[in-house]
Amino acid sequence: MERPTGQVLAGSKALIVGIANEHSIAYGCARAFRELGAELAITYLNDKAKPYVEPLAQELGASLLLPLDVSKPGELEAVFDAVRTTWGRLDVAVHSIAFAPKADLQGGLLNSSPEGFSVAMDISCHSFIRMARLAAPLMDDGGSLFAMSYLGASRVVPNYDLMGPVKAALEASCRYLAHELGPKRIRVHPVSPGPLKTRAASGLKDFDLLLNEAAERAPIGELVDIMDVGYTCAFLATPYARRMTGNTVFVDGGVSIIG
Ligand code: NAD
């Protein structure tokens, strides 16, 4: 089947957070939004990450390329200051980041430390709430906010452990933000992709087993790719999805419907 074409998002301004490299889900989102005509602001974690992200930002003709470590005080505010100065408004913000200390991620939920749990929650969940708070005043003509979740939020996925409760909190946060921001016509979408071979995923124990199982169980019979996730987000940002908000949208070839 043909991929969607056209420029339904021409003139839209989209902030994309979470590109580490060309395998990142956020890069699929950036490409899809660009393909539909949006202008992009892209962030990179730190100086070490910049050489990997900068060429991708150039290829996409990004209007802004900014550093952002959400755990560093002031960096998120600086990104939104730059967006306000350059564009004066914003239509889309994509949060495609997650982090948990390795010992806490791989040691089982039972053994997770208070510090590890709280870092994972802050970077992977509360930073989305902070993003929403900063984005909302710039979305004076409505807008859409995206956060990446995973099936482990609502079902037990072996080895997902600590990230399960963190993603559950992220999805619940999306619902509450959708309720608070609905009157401003700002829609909030938790998007739940099937497993994808990315750097973040490589931190999970036995991730290859998860990939194989998803490929076997998916009614559509194939693994998803980052463009599948990107096109779904791009669709959700268009007026075609204007009455959709708050619900988790699975992009997983149907794996989540199998008992
Ligand atoms: P990735 O490694 O390409 O992206 C993770 C990003 O998080 C990186 O760009 C990294 O720089 C960023 N990040 C980590 N700590 C940060 C911080 N303090 N400040 C700012 N950015 C920070 O991996 P990905 O798989 O594309 O992950 C993107 C999102 O998708 C994550 O939320 C992940 O949980 C989610 N997800 C991934 C899969 C999968 O199978 N890969 C499936 C479902 C959901």
Image (spheres, grey):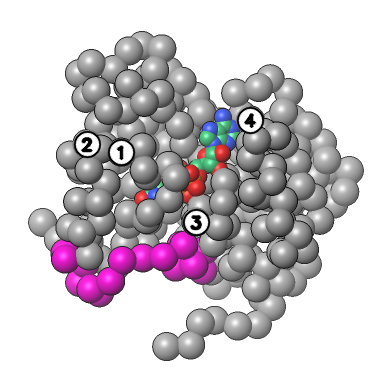
x then y, percent, for residue 249: 39, 57
Q: What number is the disc on residue 69?
A: 4
What is the CA distance from the residue labelled 4 to the residue labelled 2?
26 Å
Does the magenta portion include 146? no
Give the labeled residue for mark 1: 204
Identify the amino acid type marked 4: Asp
Residue type, mark 1 in image: Leu
Q: Which residue is mark 2?
A: 159
Q: Do the numbered discs 1 and 3 sit on residues whose CB atoms are within 8 Å?
A: no
Q: Can the viewer see residue 236?
A: no
Tell me if residue 225 is in the magenta stretch: yes
Residue 23, numbered circle: 3
Tell whether 99 sits left or right of 64: left
Residue 205 visible here: yes
Give the mark, 3 or 2, whose residue is nearer the N terminus. Answer: 3
Badge 1 element? loop
Q: Is mark 3 within 8 Å of ligand 1?
A: yes
Please say if 19 is above or below 238.
above
- Which image quadrant: the C terminus? bottom left
Residue type at tag 2: Asn
Q: Residues within 10 Å of mark 3 (few under 14, many from 20)?
A: some
Mark 4 close to ligand 1, CB under 8 Å: yes
User: Of all residues shown, which one is farthest toward the bottom?
Assistant: 1
Which callout, 2 or 1, points at the residue further toward the start of the chain? Answer: 2
Q: Are marks 4 and 3 in contact (CB under 8 Å)?
A: no
